Amino acid sequence: MGKGSRSSHVVTLVLSQALWVLPASAQTLPPNFINPNVPHDVPAGPTATVAQLAVFAWQEFIALNWVAMNPGTTGLRGRANALLNPNAGFLNVKPDGTGNFPLVVWQTYRHKNELFPADGNTASMFDSTAPTYKYATAPTAATGGPIPAFNLFNNLDETSQIGLDFMYANATSAIEPPSALPSGATPPAPTGVRVAFEAKVNRALFNYAINPSNPALALTNPSNNYQNLTTRIATTKTKLPTDGGSCTATTDPIIQLPCGSNTTAGDAGEGAIEIKSAWRKLDPTKDNISHFFTRKVLYYSGPPASQQFNNDVWGLVALHIIHKTTSFPNFVFATWEQVEDYDGPPTDPQYLAFQNLVIAKNGVLLSPLLPNIAVTRAHPIHSQVAATNTLVHNAFTAQNSATIWQYYQLVGVQGTPMNEPAANAPADVLSYFYLANIMVETNQTLQNFVGGAPTGVIAVPHVTNVYLKGSSQSPFIMGGCQGCHGFQGQDAGGDMSVLIARGARAPTALPDSIDSSAPKFPPPTK
């Protein structure tokens, strides 16, 4: 794409749609595939096939899951210990006697609450020895056991799938759909182990927000309670038709996150990266714990405004990496699942279940947003992604047959936006368009998202949600991860970043509790 010319994006769209359904039999992995350097852009550029995007995604996964330099001793965050060879830094990582794997790079990124703390006082630099979290009401330490720490790097302060449903594993009984309940009855307490989530940002995105060169223009300026952010979001919304989805310089005071570039070395060339991870408590009687990356996490319990914080060792069950690059200014979206959390119908060894948002008032059921259904993958993994996974796992196990990373699979990847395909389109096209992670986007809406979102019990009509400067087909009605970030990120003025678009809500933010917080359904933006 170079500088984002119109003709290049037209070519991108045409070529990419043709290549999505081609086999990846000739694919090979590049030399030095396993290394600690985060790739800045897709080498093939905007005409990359899904297979090439998948290789790029796996290189991100490797670099970001490389053992990190210890912030506690170095004061540095988001840095790989590049002195370690591939075995010591990635393939051979193991937990210690307490179940903790070594800290890896993405875990030391800044948490969303560190970017947008409730008091508005964002740190003046990315680096620190430990994270600091600030909510509207400070939670207190849980009692009855060892005193928990409040400065762990994995802070699981979300417990719903973007406010639409709750996800559980090891369910001991079915979660009844509201339609099956007696009139006026409230849903029974769900059973099983609830999945919790966290979101983080890299150095490039954090530095863009705090604007070290001109703090007065920072989105997080503490003197005006995120007023700069609010103002820039409003301007960005009006400029989407001309400036949305771009890496080119503009004189408009819009939010335009930095793009990764293969021609720019170091931090300046990495581009904005966001991480979302999903975790759950493991059960040694039901889970093969040796197949999970585990870490002591921070999570919350109790009613809002009087919450307690807790610590425990949980397992990583899913990981999103989104990355803005010069070739893909609408971000490359890539997502992984732990392979044993879900292996497709009819088997479901982890007894997965989810509970859709129920609209209730004073404990009385009014109406379900959607009925609960069995957890099934709506669209199979793209054939080129599956072939890439095989190549990558073989490369891993050739060097270490017991490596933990063989138990994580890339579910899919999106780069170039497209418009909604026909229902009878090839399976690979549908898989690309509706990209979803079964542990993070489970219910009917999230697995089939396209250009809209539910409100109440009525679905919003499909609307344009992704803008790509230079494309004759922009704006798009895009689906899946990219479409959702377009709807709640770019269309909301945050340049495909939902964290940026919602950052001004930080002063009233509370963490979600694992046992009592209701879903926070986001209001529609159109």
Image: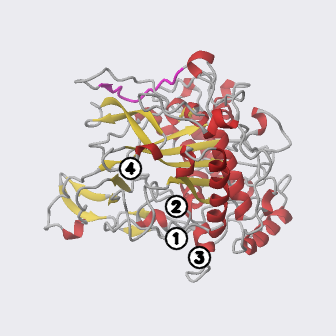
State yes or no: discs 4 and 1 in contact (Cβ < 8 Å). no
Alpha-carbon distance for marks 1 and 3?
Answer: 7 Å
Alpha-carbon distance for marks 3 and 2?
Answer: 14 Å
Q: Earlier in the sequence, mark 1 or mark 3?
A: 1
Kindly identify which numbered label has been placed on residue 436.
2
State yes or no: discs 1 and 3 in contact (Cβ < 8 Å). yes
Kindly identify which numbered label has been placed on residue 427.
3
State yes or no: discs 3 and 2 in contact (Cβ < 8 Å). no
Q: How is the image coloured?
A: secondary structure
Q: Earlier in the sequence, mark 4 or mark 1?
A: 4
Query: Residue 524's spot in the image, x, y percent?
Result: 46, 57
Q: Amino acid at mark 2?
A: Ala
- Reading the image, the residue beneath label 4 is 160
Alpha-carbon distance for marks 4 and 1?
Answer: 22 Å
Q: Earlier in the sequence, mark 2 or mark 1?
A: 1
State yes or no: discs 2 and 1 in contact (Cβ < 8 Å). yes
Q: Earlier in the sequence, mark 4 or mark 2?
A: 4
Q: Earlier in the sequence, mark 3 or mark 2?
A: 3
Foreground: disc 4 or disc 2: 2
Residue at the (62%, 29%) spot, across then down: 68
Q: Nearer the viewer, residue 123 or 239?
A: 123
Rate crowding at label 1 as few (under 14), some (14 to 19) or many (20 or more) other CA atoms within 10 Å. some
Residue 495: tell me if it is visible: no
- Reading the image, the residue beneath label 1 is 379
Q: On the image, which quarter does residue 65 sit in? A: top right
Q: Nearer the viewer, residue 164 or 82?
A: 82
Q: Amino acid at mark 4?
A: Ser
Q: Secondary structure at mark 2?
A: loop
